[in-house]
């Protein structure tokens, strides 16, 4: 396996105006010196988050980029393909632009994994440098991140558990060394992911401040939040890190992926029943004061990536008419059912803004005032964030996992999300096929611009409906992304 240089980024520090996370670059430090102190481990871990938050990874492509394009979420103009996604929408894996994005994803995530492994290779032998449960916290986060990155790599480049073709796995890298890591089978990958996540959960249960009953999530400027109250900067803003509930959420995802609905339900309910993450009030979503609007449904995010450097990139991606990724009214009609329940849906009404040509621009990531680039975060109730795991997904997982045993309870979970989004009409069907169709439809509405719906289609082997009602049949040809030519470096 190729060794990557550890990317070192400075510790989180307080902003002068808004008590938020700011990243200050620092020079690279030799690992022997870096890991001689608790602060060195903190800095190394922060570097992993920063690496993963760049635009080629979760700050752009893996949240609202090529995965959503392949899932046919956007309308693209063949006359104005400024973002070079037209062939991606056709799922043409021979396209140079898509190949480049795939290569960056593969190398970028394995780079992040290498750096988590560097932390883990030193942490047990340097246990004596830690104080106040920091050993358990840092090791738990590093294990959870390693699992998180591997799971996304597997969901892209591996075969699903229901695939009938030849099983395709990925290398599961757990050591920091020059040795080649051989490719694991899908079952082995899932086993390793679950082992890392369950170890992380046990460590974080004893060390994560977010578990404390006094820890309240909220908007940074709101006095009711306690997310910034800890005197240690490293212990603030736990929702921008792989916190305890984020690990529960990721476990729910992974267990559902392997069809272990009992454990998927248990972990999803642990998040739901914690009452840590309230559904967004309608008055916050569409507040008449644009500087108070919560378009991203911020309090519902279990874990998100802090991406202030991507503000301009997100603006150009979504808010420049047909030169960007947009949604034609006819496509919106299908996705959001605007001629029926979509007329009540707050997601449709508050996430899209019609341009002069009547096409719809996504303003989910817009900074205030809407329609312009805006780097002054004091004009927004929350910083620029890329959602990674959100509350609604836990309700979807609970609904799918409980349907066979209790269809009525399953419907209550799905209806809870619909109700929170302004849909008054409750679902009543107890037919499983109909129920799953409604679940998938609502998930597509909810995850629009967040990169998750492609994974759902793949897990369920679900055909994708594209522009103009075009059906793209489910198959390994579209769901298993080809590995880069240089993947042999990781043992593939």
Image (cartoon, grey):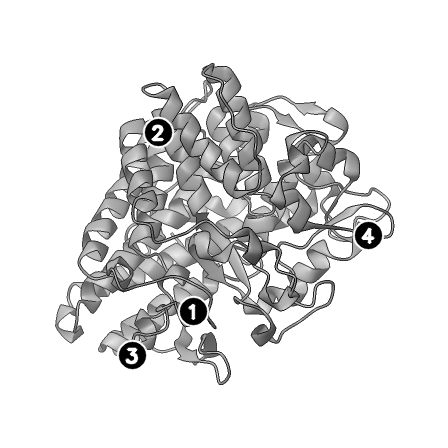
Residue 168, can we see it?
no
Q: Nearer the viewer, residue 422 or 374?
A: 422
> From the viewer's perspective, is residue 79 above or below residue 482?
below
Q: Which residue is mark 4?
A: 355
Using the numbered discs, state the Cα–Cα distance from disc 1 to disc 2 in whole angstroms. 33 Å
Q: Are marks 1 and 2 in contact (CB under 8 Å)?
A: no
Horizontal placement of 425 versus 270: left or right? Answer: right
Q: Which residue is mark 2?
A: 258
In percent of the image, x 59 and y 38: which residue is there? 445
Of pointers 3 and 4, the one earlier in the residue sequence: 3
Q: Residues within 10 Å of mark 2 (few under 14, many from 20)?
A: some
Of pointers 3 and 2, the one earlier in the residue sequence: 3
Of pointers 3 and 1, the one earlier in the residue sequence: 1
For the residues carrying marks 2 and 4, which lies nearer the camera in this image?
Answer: 4
Q: Which residue is mark 3?
A: 231
Residue 284 locus on image (x, y percent) = 55, 58
Using the numbered discs, state the Cα–Cα distance from disc 3 to disc 2 in whole angstroms. 41 Å
Q: Secondary structure at mark 2?
A: loop
In percent of the image, x 50 and y 16: which residue is there? 433
**The quadrant where residue 56 appears:** bottom right
Using the numbered discs, state the Cα–Cα distance from disc 3 to disc 1 in whole angstroms. 27 Å
Q: Residues within 10 Å of mark 3 (few under 14, many from 20)?
A: few
> From the viewer's perspective, is residue 51 above or below residue 254?
below
Residue 112 locus on image (x, y percent) = 41, 58
């Amino acid at each position: 396996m190729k060794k990557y240089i550890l990317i070192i980024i400075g510790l989180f520090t307080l902003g002068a105006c808004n008590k938020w996370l700011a990243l200050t670059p620092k020079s690279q430090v030799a690992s022997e010196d870096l890991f001689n102190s608790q602060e060195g481990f903190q800095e190394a871990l922060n570097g992993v988050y920063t690496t993963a938050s760049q635009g080629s990874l979760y700050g752009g492509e893996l949240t609202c980029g090529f995965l959503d394009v392949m899932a046919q979420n956007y309308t693209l103009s063949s006359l104005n393909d400024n973002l070079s996604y037209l062939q991606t929408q056709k799922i043409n894996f021979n396209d140079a632009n898509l190949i480049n994005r795939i290569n960056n994803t593969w190398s970028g995530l394995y780079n992040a994994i290498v750096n988590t492994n560097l932390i883990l290779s030193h942490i047990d032998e340097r246990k004596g440098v830690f104080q106040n449960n920091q050993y358990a916290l840092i090791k738990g986060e590093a294990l959870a991140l390693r699992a998180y990155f591997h799971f996304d790599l597997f969901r892209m480049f591996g075969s699903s558990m229901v695939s009938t073709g030849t099983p395709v796995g990925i290398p599961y890298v757990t050591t920091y060394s020059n040795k080649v890591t051989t490719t694991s089978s899908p079952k082995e990958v899932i086993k390793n992911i679950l082992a890392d996540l369950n170890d992380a959960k046990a460590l974080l249960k004893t060390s994560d401040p977010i578990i404390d009953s006094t820890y309240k999530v909220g908007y940074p400027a709101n006095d009711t939040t306690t997310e910034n109250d800890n005197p240690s900067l490293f212990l603030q803003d736990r929702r921008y890190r792989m916190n305890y509930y984020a690990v529960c959420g990721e476990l729910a995802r992974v267990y559902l992926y392997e069809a272990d609905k009992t454990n998927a339900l248990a972990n999803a309910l642990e998040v739901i029943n914690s009452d840590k993450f309230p559904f967004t009030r309608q008055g916050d979503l569409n507040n008449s004061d644009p500087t108070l609007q919560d378009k991203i449904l911020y309090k519902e995010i279990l874990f998100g990536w802090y991406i202030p450097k991507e503000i301009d990139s997100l603006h150009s991606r979504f808010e420049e008419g047909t030169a960007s990724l947009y949604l034609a009214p006819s496509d919106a009609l299908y996705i959001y059912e605007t001629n029926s329940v979509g007329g009540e849906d707050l997601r449709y009404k508050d996430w899209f803004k019609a341009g002069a040509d009547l096409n719809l621009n996504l303003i989910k990531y817009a900074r205030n005032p809407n329609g312009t680039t805006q780097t002054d975060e004091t004009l927004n109730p929350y910083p620029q964030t890329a959602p990674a795991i959100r509350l609604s997904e836990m309700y979807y997982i609970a609904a799918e996992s409980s349907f066979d045993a209790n269809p009525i309870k399953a419907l209550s979970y799905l209806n809870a999300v619909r109700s929170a989004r302004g849909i008054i009409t409750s679902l009543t069907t107890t037919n499983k096929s109909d129920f799953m169709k409604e679940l998938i439809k609502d998930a597509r509405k909810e995850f629009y611009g967040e990169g998750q719906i492609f994974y759902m289609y793949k897990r369920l082997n679900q055909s994708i409906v594209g522009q103009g009602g075009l059906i793209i049949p489910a198959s390994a040809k579209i769901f298993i992304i080809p590995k880069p030519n240089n993947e042999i470096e990781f043992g593939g």
